[in-house]
Image (tube, helix red, strand yellow):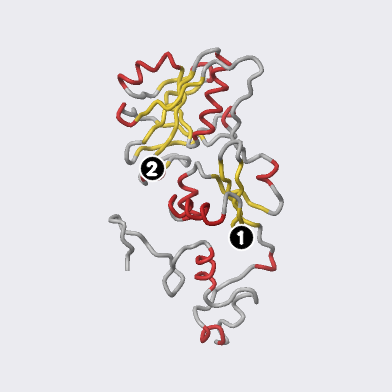
């Protein structure tokens, strides 16, 4: 397996978007997607796709404008254990792009929209790029945005928790080190963590007051961190933990593991 390859197994990470000239629509609806070479970019046969719908929209605009042809955007639900390779082509350096090498059947595809040839003076639907000045704020570290299921799961646990946080705190909010910013033009929430200075570093966190007084652990942490810190930080985000600070784990049937 190449260094950039990974398996798509979690259902929350299986959705991708593919851009193709509209003239290929009938063939795709009949046979699905098959690996194709891109001769003008010297690409080997593959199925090229994006993990961000807004990036796919921008790419469709670029292709429609450059080749003077309509472009279709297809939503893909990747088959279980489908292998993807990161797309490292120079034209896609700022995109969250991937390559697949196995056919994708029609049942896994849905045509969601078509980008017509742009009119003169029309602006592309730019997505939020990590290179934007806001994303490289010296006090913040960009983590991703709400179009990335893996990021939602990593920060909030699942999309329901994320939605509840928006309803509770609004589109723009800060909780602890987490900063959420909303762009109404793109309808995207971006996530950041505040950079930590060296003086805020810590080590082992005593689990209770008894450990905090134990000579072996009393100097293990800085003054701003006290026993129960994992639970307090989790509670700020609306999450529950067990008495040792570990997050609760959900079983496949939707119930919480004991």
Image quadrant occupied by the C terminus:
bottom left
Q: On the rendered structure, is 198 left or right of 62?
A: right
Callout 2 crowding tier (Cα within 10 Å): few <14, some 14–19, many ≥20: few
Image quadrant occupied by the N terminus:
top left
Residue 177 badge: 1
Residue sitting at x 51%, y 30%: 56
180 versus 3 height, above or below: below
186 versus 239 height, above or below: above
Residue highlighted by disc 2: 7
Residue sitting at x 31%, y 60%: 255
Q: Quadrant of residue 129?
A: top right
Horizontal and vertical percent position of residue 43: 49, 23
Horizontal and vertical percent position of residue 108: 33, 31
Q: Nearer the viewer, residue 94 or 227?
A: 227
Q: How far, Cα to Cα, is label 2 from label 1?
A: 31 Å
Callout 1 crowding tier (Cα within 10 Å): few <14, some 14–19, many ≥20: few
Q: Nearer the viewer, residue 198 or 76?
A: 76
Q: Nearer the viewer, residue 216 or 49?
A: 49
Looking at the image, tell me whether mark 2 or mark 1 is earlier in sequence order. 2
Residue sitting at x 42%, y 23%: 45
The local secondary structure at tag 1 comes to: loop
Horizontal and vertical percent position of residue 187: 56, 39
Q: On the rendered structure, is 121 left or right of 110?
A: right
Horizontal and vertical percent position of residue 202: 61, 70
Residue at the far left in the pictured view: 253
């Amino acid at each position: 397996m190449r260094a950039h390859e990974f398996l798509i197994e979690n259902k929350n990470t299986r959705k991708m978007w593919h851009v193709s000239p509209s003239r290929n629509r009938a063939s795709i609806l009949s046979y699905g997607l098959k690996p194709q070479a891109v001769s003008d970019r010297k690409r080997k046969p593959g199925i090229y796709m994006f993990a961000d719908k807004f990036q796919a929209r921008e790419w469709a605009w670029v292709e429609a404008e450059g080749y003077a042809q309509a472009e279709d955007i297809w939503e893909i639900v990747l088959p279980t254990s489908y292998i993807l390779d990161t797309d490292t082509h120079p034209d896609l350096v700022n995109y969250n792009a991937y390559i697949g090498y196995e056919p994708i059947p029609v049942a896994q595809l849905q045509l969601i929209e078509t980008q017509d040839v742009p009119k003169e003076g029309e602006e592309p639907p730019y997505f939020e790029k990590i290179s934007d000045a806001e994303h490289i704020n010296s006090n913040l570290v960009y983590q991703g945005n709400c179009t990335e299921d893996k990021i939602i799961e990593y920060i909030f646990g699942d999309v329901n928790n994320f939605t509840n946080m928006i309803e509770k705190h609004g589109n723009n909010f800060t909780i602890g080190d987490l900063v959420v910013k909303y762009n109404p033009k793109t309808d995207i929430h971006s996530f950041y963590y505040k950079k930590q200075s060296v003086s805020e570093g810590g080590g082992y966190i005593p689990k209770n007051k008894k450990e905090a007084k134990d000579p072996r652990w009393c100097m293990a942490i800085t003054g701003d961190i006290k026993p129960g810190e994992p639970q307090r930080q989790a509670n700020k985000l609306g999450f529950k933990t067990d008495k040792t600070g570990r997050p609760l784990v959900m079983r496949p049937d939707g119930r919480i593991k004991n």
